Amino acid sequence: MPKEQGRKLVAQNKKARHDFSLHDVFEAGVVLTGTEVKSLRAGRASLTDAYVTVDDGEVWLRGAHIPEYDFGTWTNHAPRRTRKLLLHKREIAKLSREGAVAGKTIIPLSVYFSDGYAKVEIAVATGKREYDKRQALAARDAERDVQRALSSRRKARR
């Protein structure tokens, strides 16, 4: 069987970019069992309410939901178990420093397969206030209006 190439997205935390302002982004490997990999390959996972902690020099993904594999037997995994993330030592040190600062948290952004290996994209983030969210939405709407005006102007020139 040929080796997988490229990146296949499994799950994405869409609310993360809306609710948090992201600072540093890391790619981490995930320690999974066989049925978890099969469930991920079927495209089933959820990152809502998931977060990352650094405990004793190890990084853990907590609260991520990978449902049981449909065709699994009694060896099936627990859907919300804690999963270990694989990072370099200096990345773990940076995450532990950043995560210890008040007001900052580490959140997962997406789960995907990169060249056949399961990966999680995590970020150090700061929570946005309600007015920050409104400003971001207003800026995005203004940019969209500008792009519409420019495209309609280009069409009128033809």
Image (cartoon, rainbow, N blue to C red):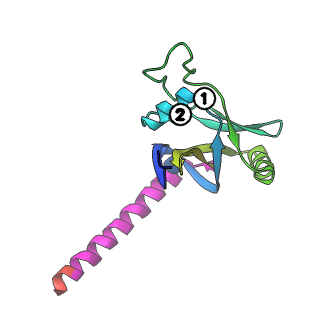
* Secondary structure beneath label 1: loop
Crowding near pointer 2: few (<14 within 10 Å), some, many (20+)?
Answer: some
Labelled disc at residue 121 = none
Q: Tags 2 and 1 in contact by the CB under 8 Å rule?
A: yes
Q: Is residue 14 visible?
A: yes
36 or 14: nearer the viewer? 36
Question: Residue at coordinates 57% horizontally, 17% vertically from top-left?
Answer: 75
Residue 154 against residue 74 in the figure, above or below: below
Question: Residue at coordinates 44% horizontally, 33% vertically from top-left?
Answer: 44
Name the residue type under label 2: Val
Labelled disc at residue 33 = 1
Residue 81 drawn at (x, y percent): 62, 25
Q: Residue extending furthest top?
A: 74
Q: Which residues are the magenta region? A: 125-154
Find out whether residue 134 is within the magenta segment. Answer: yes
Q: Main secondary structure of the magenta part?
A: helix
* Secondary structure beneath label 2: helix
Q: CA distance from mark 2 to mark 1?
A: 7 Å
Name the residue type under label 1: Thr
Q: Residue extending furthest bottom?
A: 157
Residue 118 against residue 132 in the figure, above or below: above
Labelled disc at residue 37 = 2
Residue 34 drawn at (x, y percent): 56, 29
157 or 137: nearer the viewer? 157
Query: Which image quadrant for residue 70?
Result: top left
Crowding near pointer 1: few (<14 within 10 Å), some, many (20+)?
Answer: few
Q: Quadrant of the C terminus?
A: bottom left
